[in-house]
Each structure stands twice: as structure tokens, then as C-alpha cells.
């Protein structure tokens, strides 16, 4: 997680600087997003794993340290991170949409590194398999019997996220209107996660009916992403951040009202 966060922030700062955004504002955004993201990931983990009575009992017997144990849920981190980013953008006095292009493409890269951590920890594993791709994790990590092979869904998702990262780098070569990059990302990842969930074999995920909690969230994200893309592309009003003749501002650009470099017309 630490490696993912450091790399994501570093690349985001470099990408923001090329687009005329003060890297310090990206750092401000990152602090809010990371803290809120960790809280969100932890909260969703407890919600899908324990009942309210079990959580109260854990806190009663183990104290507040019980909340620091166990795992995290990515979707909780994504939701919490977006809320934190909203606060961070307000604190940095820069419209959140300006961070969409430089920051969003880096999220799947950070997620891919996080999934590699899941592989090393033996969590978020796939279904039992006899296939050659199967991996045996220590019993103490998975709770499965010794020698049982499972699908390494952690690596599959890491690979898929790297492909999404590469696509978004290409997609953001030109400035994209508003939150278009964010909408594209959540729609693509929603499809990716929905399908990978069918391969997951760990039980600590939560289910609502015939789909897992993450699959229901995936459906909601796909819908939100598609609707957001349609509305953004159909918007008649001009995007104030969209350059008319240059993709990005150059080094001699003047500062705009937010203190960042304004695009050269």
C-alpha cells in the first residue's frame, strides 16, 4: 500500500505539473484522499464482514485496536477517496475536475500494486482449481487445507489494472472535458471487477442475493460511468479548462484565477 501510494502521488504530481497545475495542490488532494480512502476501505470491510453485534463485541473485548486489524475493501477506499478528494480540492481552492486527467489514470496502477500485495498476503484469492494456473497459499493465510490450489485472482486483477492504466494514459494525451476520464475509469473498472468476482473464492466479501457486495457496487459504478460520459459529451456549454488550440499549457502560460497556469489560446 505504501509503495502504491508513493508512486501514485509522485506520478500524479509530474502529470499535473505538465498540465500547469501546482504539484503542491496535488499533494493536498492526495492527503485528504488517502486518509479518507483508508477509512472508507476499513469501514466497508467491517460492514460486509461482521454484523453490528459482532463489531460491538470485538471493540468490547479487544478495544479500539480491533478496528485496525484485518483487511480493507477497495470499493470502500474508492468511495472514501473521492469524498476526501472533494474536501481536498476545496482546501486547495482548485476545481476537482482539473485533477481528473492527471490523477485518475494513475489509480489503476496503484491498485495493481495493491493487488500484488494481496497476492503476497494470501488474501482476495480465487476459487479452488486443479488448473496449471492454480497457486497454493499457506493454510494460515487462507484457512484452506494444505496443498489446495486456488485461482490467483489477485494477479489477474493486477494485470487488468495495468492494461487500464496504459489505456488511460493514451486516453488523456489530450485534455478531456470535465470528469470524463473519471467516468471512463469507473465504468471500465466496474466491468472488470464484476467479472473477476465470479472467480473469487474467499468468503469474506459479503453477498446480497445472488451477487456479491462488490458486484452490486460494480453495477452502480458502470451505470454512473455510462450516464456521466453521456452527459459530459452532450454538454453544450464549453469547458473552461479545455484548451482550444493546445492540448496543454506551456511553460510561459499566465496564471488563472486559481493560481495555476492557464491554457494558451
Image (spheres, rainbow, N blue to C red):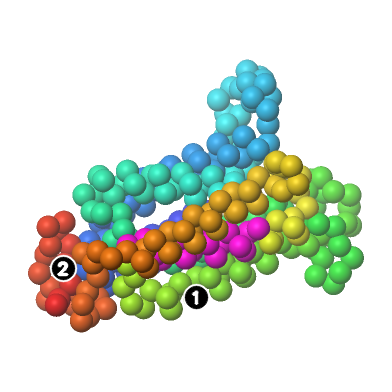
The disc at residue 262 is: 2
Q: Quadrant of residue 209?
A: top right
Q: Residue at x 56, y 62 (%)?
A: 189
Asked if residue 216 lies left or right of residue 38, the reply is right
Separation of marks 1 and 2 at Cα, in angstroms: 27 Å
Mark 1 secondary-structure assignment: helix
- Placement of 170 over or under 42, stated as above or below: below
State the quadrant of the C terminus.
bottom left
Expressed as whole percent of the image width and height from the top left, the position of residue 82 reads 42, 49
Expressed as whole percent of the image width and height from the top left, the position of residue 117 reads 61, 57
Asked if residue 245 lies left or right of residue 8, the reply is left
Q: Residue at x 34, y 70 (%)?
A: 176
Expressed as whole percent of the image width and height from the top left, the position of residue 8 reads 43, 62
Q: Residue at x 46, y 44 (%)?
A: 80
User: What residue span does the magenta drawing correspond to?
Assistant: 178-194
Residue extending furthest bottom? 245
Amino acid at each position: 500500500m505504501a509503495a502504491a501510494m508513493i508512486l501514485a502521488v509522485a506520478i500524479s504530481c509530474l502529470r499535473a505539473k505538465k498540465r500547469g497545475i501546482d504539484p503542491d495542490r496535488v499533494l493536498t488532494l492526495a492527503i485528504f484522499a488517502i486518509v479518507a480512502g483508508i477509512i472508507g476501505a476499513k469501514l466497508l470491510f467491517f460492514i460486509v464482514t461482521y454484523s453490528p453485534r459482532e463489531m460491538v463485541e470485538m471493540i468490547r473485548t479487544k478495544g479500539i485496536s480491533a478496528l485496525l486489524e484485518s483487511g480493507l475493501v477497495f470499493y470502500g477506499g474508492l468511495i472514501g477517496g473521492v469524498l476526501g478528494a472533494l474536501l481536498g480540492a476545496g482546501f486547495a481552492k482548485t476545481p476537482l475536475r482539473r485533477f481528473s486527467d492527471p490523477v485518475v489514470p494513475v489509480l489503476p496502477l496503484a491498485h495493481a500494486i495493491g493487488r500484488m500485495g494481496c497476492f503476497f498476503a494470501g488474501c482476495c484469492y480465487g476459487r479452488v482449481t486443479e488448473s496449471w494456473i492454480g497457486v497454493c497459499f499457506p493454510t494460515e493465510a487462507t484457512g484452506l487445507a494444505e496443498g489446495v490450489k486456488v485461482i490467483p485472482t489477485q494477479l489477474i486483477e493486477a494485470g487488468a489494472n495495468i492494461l487500464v492504466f496504459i489505456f488511460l494514459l493514451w486516453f488523456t494525451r489530450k485534455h478531456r472535458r470535465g470528469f470524463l476520464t473519471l467516468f471512463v475509469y469507473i465504468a471500465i473498472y466496474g466491468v472488470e471487477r464484476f467479472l473477476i468476482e465470479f472467480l473469487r473464492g474467499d468468503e469474506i466479501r459479503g453477498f446480497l442475493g445472488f451477487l456479491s457486495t462488490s458486484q452490486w457496487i460494480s453495477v452502480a459504478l458502470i451505470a454512473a460511468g455510462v450516464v456521466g460520459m453521456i452527459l459530459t459529451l452532450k454538454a453544450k456549454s464549453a469547458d473552461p479548462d479545455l484548451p482550444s488550440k493546445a492540448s496543454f499549457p506551456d511553460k510561459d502560460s499566465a496564471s488563472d484565477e486559481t493560481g495555476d497556469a492557464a491554457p494558451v489560446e
